[in-house]
Image (cartoon, helix red, strand yellow):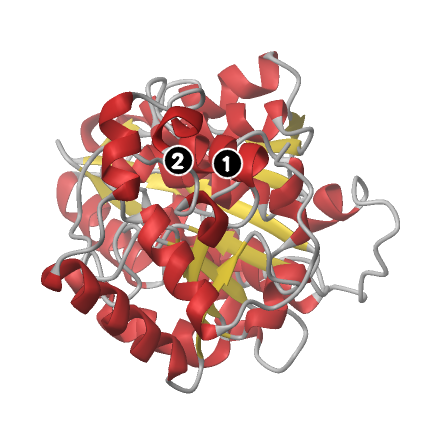
Amino acid sequence: MTAAIAPASVGADELAHWLRLTQTAGVGSETARRLLAAFGMPGDIFQTDFSALTTVVSARVARALLTLPDAAERAKIACAQAWAAEAGNAILTLADSAYPSSLLDIPDPPPILYVKGRIALLESPALAVVGSRNATAQGIANAEQFSAALSEAGLTIVSGLALGIDTAAHQGALRAGGMAGSTIAVIGTGADIVYPARNRALAHHIAEDGCIVSEYPLGMPAIAANFPRRNRIISGLARGVLVIEAAAQSGSLITARLAAEQGRDVFAIPGSIHSPLAKGCHQLIKQGAKLVESAQDVLEEFSAFDARPIMPLEAANAATASHPLLHAMGYDPVPAEALATRAGLDAASLAAQLLTLELDGLIERLPGEIYRRLH
C-alpha cells in the first residue's frame, strides 16, 4: 500500500518533478514510493540534503536525485508534458484524484501512468481477460464472445494488447459498442508506441473508444522484462481475471497469481485434457479458480455490480451442428485417419466433409492433419 497522498491534480511544475523522479536512474516504482513516503512530494525530494536521502536510497541514487537534469533529460520531460497536453492524453500520478483507486490497493502501484483515451474507464467495474499468444481458433472465439457478452453487461475488459487471446478480448469488448463497457489495454512499451505493430489499427480503435495505459516513459521500446511487470496493473485494474487458454508455463499464470495476491477473483475456462493450452487453466482450477462455462458464471461472483442482462453465447446453427461427422469427432483433437475409421468414410468423402465443416467455422485443422471441433 502506498503512502497516503492528498488527492489533487498536480500542476505543470509538479508534473515536471514527477517525471524527473521517475526518470532518474536507479529509481523504480518501489524506490519512488519510499522516497515519497519519507519526504513528501517529488519537489520536496529534490530539496532534501544528501545525508537525509541516503537514509532511504544508496549514495549513487542520492547523487542522481540531486543532479540537475541535463539537456536531453529536460527535453524528455518537455516532450512528456507536451504529449499530456494533447486532447485525449493524460499523465496521472499518485497525487492525482483521477489516479485509479483500485491500483492504490495493490502492493506495487506505479507512481505515474500515461493514459490515452477514456480516462473514466479506469474507475469502471472491470474484468481482465488474458491467455495464450498462440491461441487456437476456439480460444479466439471464446475470448471474443465472453468479452463481448461481459462488456454488454457493463464490465470494462482489461488486457495486454498482445496477439492471440488479448487481441480477441479487446476486439470482443469493442464489438459490444455503445457505453455498455469497453476495453483497457495495459501495454509494456511507451504509450506512444504500438507493439506488436500488427495491432496498430486495434490500438487506434482502443484509444478512441477505450483506453491505453502504460507506466513506462514515452519512447520506451518493447523490452521482454517489462511485459510480466505490467501484468500487476492488468490484474490491479480489474475485479477478477479470466484465463482463456494458457500453457503450464505461461505469462497468463503470472497475471492470475498476482490477481490472487491482490485479492481479486480468478476464473478459468477448461479445455481438452490433451491440449497443452488447457493445462494452465486446469492448474488454476485445481488451485481454486472458478471453472467458467458462461459469462453468467463470472457475473455471479461480482457482488454490488448492477449487471445488464446478457444473452447466452451464440451457438452454431442446430441443423449444421448435428452433422454426423461432428458426433464422430467428439470434442478432443482427432487425426484424420482415425476420424475416417470412426465415421466409416473413405479419404475423398472425409476430405470433402471436413472442408465444409471448416468453412462453416465448426472445426479447425491443427498441424499434422489433426482436427478439432469448435462447437
| Lower position in the chain sequence, tag 1 or tag 2 | 1
Q: Nearer the viewer, residue 5 or 58?
A: 58
User: Against 56, is 240 above or below?
Assistant: below
Disc 2 marks which amino acid? Asp
Q: Nearer the viewer, residue 180 or 195?
A: 195
Give the residue at mark 2. Answer: 49
Helix, strand or loop for disc 2: loop
How many badges with numbers are in the image? 2
Give the residue at mark 1. Answer: 33
Image location (x, y in percent) of residue 106:
61, 34
Query: Alpha-carbon neighbours of circle 2 within 10 Å: few (<14), some, or many (≥20)?
Result: few
> Which label lies toward us, 1 or 2?
2
User: Against 12, is 253 above or below?
Assistant: above
**Residue at point 13% right, 57% down?**
70
Q: Quadrant of residue 154?
A: bottom right
**Does residue 26 show up?**
no
- Real-space Cα separation, disc 1 to disc 2, in angstroms: 18 Å
Question: In the shown orientation, is residue 298 left or right of residue 209?
Answer: right
Q: Nearer the viewer, residue 99 or 339?
A: 99
Question: In the shown orientation, is residue 286 left or right of residue 234?
Answer: right
